[in-house]
Amino acid sequence: MAIKIDGLSLTIDDVVRVARGGVKVELTDEAKRRVEYCRAYVDRKLSEGAVIYGLTTGFGKFSDTLISADDTAALQRNLIISHACGMGEPLPTEAVRGIMLLRCNALSRGNSGIRPSTLQTLIDMLNAGVHPIIPEKGSLGASGDLAPLSHMVLTMLGEGRAEYRGEVMHSRDAMKKAGIDTVELAAKEGLALINGTQVMTSIGALVVYDAMNLAKTADLAAAMTTEASLGILKAFDAKVHELRGQPGQKIVASNMRTLLAGSRLAFDTNPEKVQDAYSIRCVPQIHGASRDGLKYAYDVLSRELNAVTDNPLIFPDDDEAISGGNFHGQPIAIAMDTAGMAIAELANVSERRIERLVNPQLSGLPAFLTRHGGVCSGFMITQYSAASMVSENKIYAHPACVDSIPSSANQEDHVSMGTTAARKARMILSNSERVVGIELFAAAQAVDFRGAEKLAPATRAAYDLIRSRVPFIEHDIVMHDEMVKLEQLVSSRALLDAAEAVCGSLA
């Protein structure tokens, strides 16, 4: 069933369904009415000779330059072709589809002045699978994502390149194969299509969606490591966490109790030790803080999905076109920097638990989880790999939002770098999924020394899935291949699904 877009009700789940699932979209009747009404107002103001930024003036530093009616079409086309200055590798198709969806949704509010036919062209491209090639670099995050969105609009004009049915070709050919007419932009339309935060928001929405799943999988990994370490359950007692009251902490503590219910490896007390190390005992506090950071980012992005972020904004009923700054990406920049740090911390503490598993002085298990130490190195270098990615994450976790470089002759004197924040959060996420996968790989190996039959039902379900793909490592093998399998089990949610099938949905 197609998703109805109205500029008001889009969710992150909807973005995922369209970006990854190929679900089609269509405008609601009310959205069509609003778009038509706003465009009629724009046409009327143009006929009256009104001076409106971006319609009858130049852009940025040229905002004081008046444009004649004869040059209106050239103004909009020149805006797109001159602003298509992106560099670097193309954004993934899922991000591009998200960008197209979010731009359609913003335009459907009826405050941008675009013609209904132009908006429908972008919807038709999305539904037909005509995906503009959008370079990943070049946005300052204010005025929105000008450069990357210009590459999106190039395809609407029959310029640039696009992917269609798995093949990259000239946009004109892609549009022709899909049976979609190219567009000649009218007044305001070029600006309406590129002045917004949809690139950073699309990337960010997909990252945060995946990060929410990773956070639960990190709880699962921590639970299995707790069992492999003969951990103490009392640290997860609800009474402890109620006294602090942090919501994420309480959620993670509840998840740990659920995942470890029925374990014969982790107990309320352990006569051999009073308490566990922080990386196990403080899982609710550490993972929980990441949960709270991700929840903040999720909420900001959820609002931005339905935001109108171009400039000027048209208010037909008030007879106003207002130049504002909704295109400024600072809310997304801070949210995605926060998300990146939150995800990085999940990997940081996961790597510390890996070290506890492979270090015989900390685990009481064979060194590097091999019976044949010396001739075999076992899991020695898996920890190196995890440490490498964790350290790389520390570089990516430096906030982008605190940086700003003036542009457009200092007219745009503060920028958000929001798209950089979203892109680096995506890199942190990829590294962190790998690190959590390595922890689960090592934890499964460690559990085999303890007795897998003693695992809690939920962790046993995850263990069984791991063992269906990856064997116990008796002698040294190419570990990379097995680590990739674990990464895929993490990123696909397969391990989380296996555990939840037994214990119910985690919070």
Image: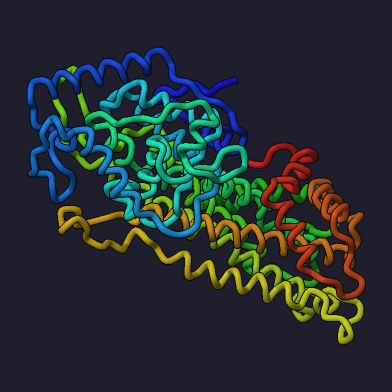
Please give the name of the residue rendered at 80% of the width and 72% of the height, measured from the top-left corner.
Answer: 272
Name the image colouring: rainbow
Total numbered labels: 0
- Is residue 103 something one can see in this rendering? yes
User: x, y (%) of residue 387?
Assistant: 63, 73
Comparing 234 with 481, the one in front is: 481
Comparing 361 with 367, the one in front is: 367
Residue reaching furthest bottom?
374
Please give the name of the residue rendered at 77% of the width and 45% of the height, measured from the top-left corner.
Answer: 499
Residue 103's quadrant in the figure? top left
Comparing 56 with 15, the one in front is: 56
Comparing 276 with 36, the one in front is: 36
Q: Quadrant of the N terminus?
A: top right
Q: Quadrant of the C terminus?
A: top right
- Is residue 330 something one can see in this rendering? no
Please give the name of the residue rendered at 8% of the width and 27% of the height, measured from the top-left corner.
Answer: 50
Residue 180 is left or right of residue 469, and the answer is left
Please give the name of the residue rendered at 40% of the width and 35% of the height, measured from the top-left corner.
Answer: 156
User: x, y (%) of residue 444?
Assistant: 82, 61
User: x, y (%) of residue 159?
Assistant: 40, 42
Residue 186 is left or right of residue 104, and the answer is left
User: x, y (%) of residue 433?
Assistant: 64, 57
